[in-house]
Image (cartoon, rainbow, N blue to C red):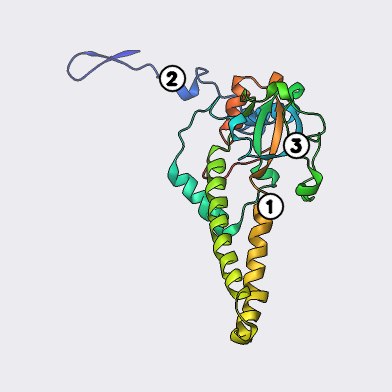
Amino acid sequence: MVGKKKDGGEKDSSKKTKVGDSLLLDDRPSGDGKLEEAVTNRNTLDDHARKAVIGYARLDLIEKKEELRFGYWNDRPLKKAQVNSLVQSFLTKGADRFSVTKAIPLVVSQSEMKPGTYKTSYTPGVDAAKDLPILELNDSAKGKKRLVAAGGQHRLHAIQEWLNMLKKTHKEMARDRQHVEGQDTDNVAEMDIDIENHSRKAKRDAIEETLALRGQWLVILYDTAQINRRLGMHLSENESDHVYRQTPEE
């Protein structure tokens, strides 16, 4: 029914329908609880990465630095501040070089690895220095940067600086030892002998044991035939928690 407005115009007395009362909006319920899409995608990539692992080994990063290729997927500049932070961490906490969570991922061709220089499985917690071999390339692969590293550039430089500092400290301590050795027994206090035997020697031995490992670090080997660009980026962006996690400085 159309009535009259006070001003003489007509007014519409028909009832208006609210959008909420109509069927215009989709009101179907959401599904069951589920992980966010970003997490699901990351888990899928982690699963692909696990399947691409062909082995584990120790690698002397310093000795083999010319064989390493960094930045293939994620080219990041070397930052001195990050290197310094790692060096300080090594000095105060040591280098957890054989931890699976800190392993460096290497993408390699299995045919270019010398047989017997890596293992197809690794149990965390065992003595890696005894259980894992040191990775070696076949002669035909040497000098061609066939070890494509998806991380670890800052660690390489930090290890070099750290070991150089330890060598310098050890040299100074050895010089102190030689000074004591050159003294007449009557001129050396018993306390000095005790300090040398129970304090300085222990520190010197610890440094020598660290230096004996040189630049060794745990590496996880991935089959280059199974690593496409997307998976390579995933490995190099510190997102793979399936077998390793790089340090915050990386």
Residues under numbered marks 3 and 1 in contact, where contact means CB atoms less than 8 Å apart:
no
Tell whether 80 sits left or right of 65: left
**Viewport quadrant of the N terminus:** top left
Residue ID for mark 3: 56
Residue ID for mark 2: 17
Residue ID for mark 1: 212
Q: Callout 1, which amino acid?
A: Ala
Name above or below for residue 16 compared with residue 40. above
Q: Tell me the tag on residue 112.
A: none
Tell whether 158 sits left or right of 144: left
Q: Callout 2, which amino acid?
A: Thr
Q: Quadrant of residue 100?
A: top right
Q: Residues within 10 Å of mark 3 (few under 14, many from 20)?
A: many
Name above or below for residue 87 compared with residue 200. above
Tell whether 188 sits left or right of 121: left
N-terminal label among 1 and 2 = 2
Q: Secondary structure at mark 2?
A: loop
Q: Callout 3, which amino acid?
A: Tyr
Q: Estimate the spatial distance between the alpha carbons at disc 1 and disc 2, rounded to whole Å.
A: 83 Å
The residue sitting at 63% across, 66% down in the picture is: 203
Percent x, y for residue 48?
70, 26
Q: Quadrant of residue 134?
A: top right
Q: Secondary structure at mark 3?
A: strand
Give the label, 3 or 1, closer to the camera. 1
Q: Is residue 34 visible?
A: no
Q: Residue furthest left?
A: 7
The residue sitting at 53% across, 55% down in the picture is: 165
Percent x, y for residue 216?
67, 44
N-terminal label among 3 and 2 = 2
Name above or below for residue 216 compared with residue 195. above
Q: Secondary structure at mark 1?
A: helix
